[in-house]
Amino acid sequence: MEPNLTLRAVLNHLIQTCKDGQEGYLTAAQNISDPQLRRRLSEYSLQRAKFSGELQTASHELGDSNPEYASSAAGAFHRGWINLKGVVADRDSHAILVECARGESCAVTAYEEALLLALPAPIREIVARQHVAVQTAHDRIKGFTGTPEVKPV
């Protein structure tokens, strides 16, 4: 397989992961009553939109004319955000935050796997910087849940 195709596949997976996080955090923010948490979750949603945009730009520069622009329901399950839809109806803040932490666990793993690859320096810098922010968000969300470890499904 051509190296750029593999790299574009990795970038598309991270783009999808960010898009799922963006949608997940937005859904969570809209369904949580605490204004401070709502603001934090909205910030994470915007952060993920920015991250996906950066990754889409990098993918364009590699010649991908149509990098992933939307999240997918099937992929969201694997990226940990699908269960959020089931808990928002009850507006249970703890359950919503647990699902956010689960989604973030999957995102952390996706970034860690990408960083194991031989990425070109400019892309490695983007992925590494985003990984730090995703890990920080994961740790904060996990702290809000009061749960020591939230495992991805």
Image: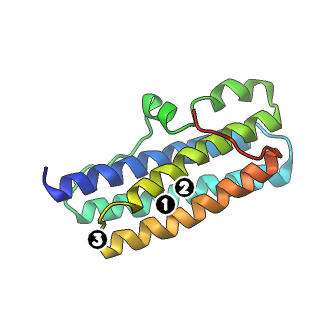
> In the figure, residue 57 lies in which quadrant?
bottom left
Query: Seen in the image, is 43 located left or right of residue 54?
Result: right
Instruction: Sort mark 1 into few (<14), some (14-19) or many (20+) by Cα contacts within 10 Å.
Output: many
Which element type, helix, strand or loop, lies under badge 3? Answer: loop
Q: Which numbered tag is attached to residue 48? A: 2
Can you name the residue that lies furthest to the left here? 2
Residue shown at 84% from the left, 50% from the top = 35
Q: Which numbered tag is attached to residue 119? A: none
Residue, disc 3: 120
Query: Seen in the image, is 149 located left or right of residue 34?
Result: left
Between circles 3 and 1, the one closer to the viewer is 3
Residue, disc 1: 51
Residue shown at 27% from the left, 60% from the top = 60
Q: Earlier in the sequence, mark 3 or mark 1?
A: 1
Query: Seen in the image, is 121 located left or right of residue 78?
Result: left
Which element type, helix, strand or loop, lies under badge 2? Answer: helix
Q: Earlier in the sequence, mark 2 or mark 3?
A: 2
Mark 1 vs mark 2, CA separation in Å: 5 Å
Mark 2 vs mark 3, CA separation in Å: 22 Å
Mark 3 vs mark 1, CA separation in Å: 18 Å
The amino acid beneath tag 3 is Pro
Residue 8 spot, x, y in % from top left:
27, 54
Q: Are marks 2 and 3 in contact (CB under 8 Å)?
A: no
Q: Are marks 1 and 2 in contact (CB under 8 Å)?
A: yes
The amino acid beneath tag 2 is Arg
Total marks drawn? Answer: 3
